[in-house]
Amino acid sequence: MGRKSSAKTQTQPPASPPAPKRSSMPLVAGVVALALIGAGFVYVRSVRLQPDQVPNAAQATPQPAPIPADLKPHPQANLPPLQFPGYPMPRSAEIVTAAYRFAAEHPEILSYVPCFCGCERSGHRGNEDCFVKARDINGDVVLWDEHGMDCAVCIDVATQARQLFTKGAAVREIRAAIDKEWGPKATTHTHTPEPPAAN
């Protein structure tokens, strides 16, 4: 009888299942993330801080921008209209209006008078900033700061400064009176520079 082929009788190992296809998404996401990190690093390295922007540990308190030495009274015939809120303000509309007008026309006073309501966290340097947001190149108010309408402290400080000014007090006297009145009651105040020695 014939011999059976040995090839037929040998058992073949079972075929291994095909390897699952790997997704290339994690690899692509990793490459994109590395590219973004690299681009961010290059951008940060390319940005140079100005000398006055470099953080200094010795300067724990923010320093106000310098106030021009030639501030003068600035009467303004046409002030922008005030937009009163639709709810009651802490002081009457007449007192609020007088505070805004005084801030507009007397930067030589309120630029040197601190505010004690905590508004330095919003970048205010003094009581004038509670009312005036922007002036044009001639010094005319072009934009009001709405903060002064809602804050009794801002209004009262400006009102006290206005009353002292009306009685003939110099800016140094006004500053001293405001500091004496409000300093002991307040836990914070704007970092307002002292008035020039001549005032």
Image (cartoon, rainbow, N blue to C red):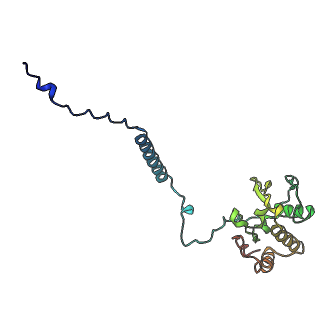
Q: Depth check: give the residue in front, 11 or 129.
A: 11
Q: Which quadrant does the N terminus fall into?
A: top left
* Residue at image location 79% in from the left, 73% down from the top: 171
Q: Is residue 142 above or below residue 118?
A: above
90 versus 169 height, above or below: above
Relative to residue 156, is residue 58 drawn left or right?
Answer: left
Where residue 147 sits in the image (x, y, percent)? Answer: 79, 61
Residue 149, picture quadrant? bottom right
Q: Residue furthest top?
A: 1
Q: Position of residue 44 (x, y in %)?
A: 49, 53
The image position of residue 121, as x and y in percent, is 69, 65
Tally of marks: 0
Tell me which residue sits at (82%, 62%) in the image. Answer: 150
Q: Is residue 150 above or below residue 26?
A: below
- The quarter of the displayed image where residue 159 is located: bottom right
Left or right, 184 with reference to 57: right
Relative to the observer, which residue lies in front, 93 or 34? 34
Point out the image quarter for the C terminus.
bottom right
Q: Quadrant of residue 194?
A: bottom right
Q: Nearer the viewer, residue 16 or 134?
A: 16
Q: Is residue 50 left or right of residue 41?
A: right
Q: Write the residue at 53% across / 58% down.
A: 49
- Residue 153 in percent (x, y) is at 81, 70
